[in-house]
Amino acid sequence: MIVRTDAVVLRAFDYGETSRIVTLLTRRHGVLSALARGARRPKSRFGAALQPMAYVQVVYYHKEGRGLQTLKEAAYVARFGHLGADLEKTTVGLRMVELARALLHEHDPNAPVLGLLAHTLAWVDAARSDGAPRAANALPWFQLRLATLLGFAPDVRRGDVEALGDAGVLLLDTGAVVPAGAPAGLAGHAALRASRAALRAFAVFALADLDTAGRLRLDGPTRTEVEAAVDAYLRYHTEDAFPERVRRVADQMAGGAGTPPG
């Protein structure tokens, strides 16, 4: 069966002397792998459209039960020209596609996640790297929206956030925020203590739209704390499936030159 659909490239690596194998999040068949024969030749019909984070329209031959499909065409739906030119944007984008690849089941269509990923990549591409909106804010926002689409939305309530003192607790099983001095609310829950500023930021990322979340200003310690809280929440619900390779590589590269992780 010949299929034409839009997709985001999640991963790509060389195969043989001239070809590439790509992992795609497609609208029609969800996550799938495909062989792009001749993709590395100088005059390949695929051009540069098979790079991770690319939003493309693809044509492939699909056969049920086959682990590797055959890709025939790929062309940009939208070009994200700034994603690969800025280390912060590259890291944010690669972490998002890494999450999608790790947490989605193969061959299980999920158009809302595809829409979320394409929208957030476009926003990051257009965002500023300093000031507001801030590209880095898109990652925790995307993570919590992805959690919602996968069935474990954080149960953040504005009243609970407003009741916080200087610190509070994030309940990892529900995503609720409670005051640190409320032992009755902690019984039987895996909990992460965090500052009021970090928990308020967690609430913004969970409840606000991307434009609003993107304007949130965070100092360095608060950003580190809220990103760790969001990671902990997703890791609690996805366990060993939660990917961390891009984050580890980015941490190693922080402050130095190098090639972004792919």
Image (cartoon, rainbow, N blue to C red):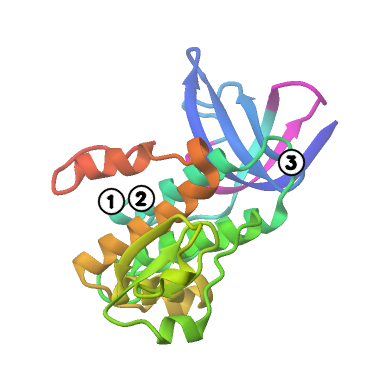
| Residue 195 placement: quadrant | bottom left
- The label nearer to you, 1 versus 3, is 3
Q: Depth check: give the residue in front, 61 or 234.
A: 234
At a point 60% along the width and 26% down the height, the residue shown is: 36
Percent x, y of residue 126? 41, 67
Q: CA distance from mark 3 to mark 2?
A: 27 Å
The residue at which mark 3 appears reads as 108
Percent x, y of residue 204? 44, 76
The residue at which mark 1 appears reads as 87
Is residue 222 found left or right of 39 in the rendered image?
left
Extreme residue toward the left, this view = 255
Q: Depth check: give the residue in front, 36 or 111.
A: 111
- On whether residue 222 falls in the magenta region, the answer is no
Percent x, y of residue 208? 50, 78
At a point 49% along the width and 52% down the height, the residue shown is: 234
Q: Residues within 10 Å of mark 1 (few under 14, many from 20)?
A: many
At a point 54% along the width and 44% down the height, the residue shown is: 238
Q: Depth check: give the residue in front, 137 or 75.
A: 137
The reply to whether the C-beta atoms of the residues labelled 1 and 3 are less than 8 Å apart is: no
Quarter of the figure with the C terminus? top left
Numbered tag placed on residue 90 in the rendering: 2
Please, what is the three-letter code of the amino acid marked with disc 3? Asp
Q: Depth check: give the residue in front, 257 or 71.
A: 257
Q: CA distance from mark 1 to mark 3?
A: 32 Å
Q: Residues within 10 Å of mark 3 (few under 14, many from 20)?
A: some
Is residue 50 found left or right of 25 in the rendered image?
left
